[in-house]
Image (cartoon, rainbow, N blue to C red):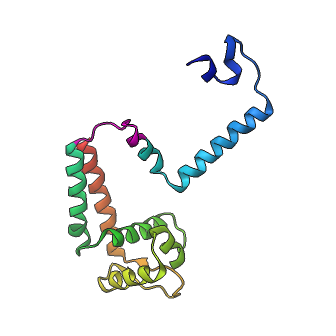
Amino acid sequence: MARSDAPAGLRDGRIRAASLAEIGVLLEEAARLVHAHALDPTADLLALAEHGALPETNPRWVRALLDVRRLRTEFLGVPVTDTALTILLELYAAALEQRPLSRAALAEAAGLAPATLASHLTRLEAATLVAPPADPAQAPALTPTTAKNLRAWLAAAAEIAGAAV
């Protein structure tokens, strides 16, 4: 590390206490980074990719990912789009966390407009993957069969991913 790049407390080979202002600046920057990561957890990986800092992609891992995507139809019993799978996984996570989920929160979590979410939910209900809620403002619940099948699919996905690493 060049002397000009050294932290303030280590310049010229001498250690000195940081001022409250310097600590405040560091804490603010740390808070900004944590907030940015919470808003977009992929940003760090994208920044690494731009600088060529990511490890080489293992073709076995890519094939495993494709296998996992194909298996979702086998486990769920019907073909589901990526968007529908996102909705199902958001519902599954909320159920595991034992927290209620409104349609508005589900739409936001899935990155969908409310009308688009409603369209997907209609198809998921028709496929008997979700049960309509008593309160239309609430998100539907996974059927017990869907919850069981998602759990099995996720277990298979973890096993496949572990074998590919």
Q: Which quadrant holds residue 59?
A: top left
Above/below status of 17 relative to 139: above
Percent coordinates x, y for residue 11 in the rendering: 68, 17
Above/below status of 65 relative to 70: above
Q: Going by the image, does 75 lie left or right of 89?
A: left
Percent coordinates x, y for residue 142 in the rendering: 39, 75
Q: Residue at x 38, y 42 (%)?
A: 49
Q: Residue at x 79, y 29 (%)?
A: 19
Pick whichever, 121 or 23, lies toward us.
Answer: 23
Pick whichever, 163 or 27, lies toward us.
Answer: 27
User: Is residue 102 visible in this depiction of the protein?
Assistant: no
User: Is residue 27 visible in this depiction of the protein?
Assistant: yes
Pick whichever, 93 or 27, lies toward us.
Answer: 27
User: How many circles with numbers are drawn on the protein?
Assistant: 0
User: Which residue is most to the top?
Assistant: 13
| Residue interval drawn in magenta | 48-58
Percent coordinates x, y for residue 73 in the rendering: 22, 69
User: Which residue is most to the right?
Assistant: 20
Q: Which quadrant holds residue 154?
A: bottom left
Q: Residue at x 51, y 79 (%)?
A: 103
The quadrant the C terminus occupies is top left
The quadrant the N terminus occupies is top right
Magenta stretch: residue 1 in it?
Answer: no
Above/below status of 64 relative to 100: above
Above/below status of 23 relative to 128: above
Q: Residue at x 44, y 69 (%)?
A: 110
Percent coordinates x, y for residue 97 in the rendering: 51, 63
Q: Going by the image, does 128 lie left or right of 13?
A: left
Magenta stretch: residue 53 in it?
Answer: yes
Magenta region, mostly helix, strand or loop?
A: loop
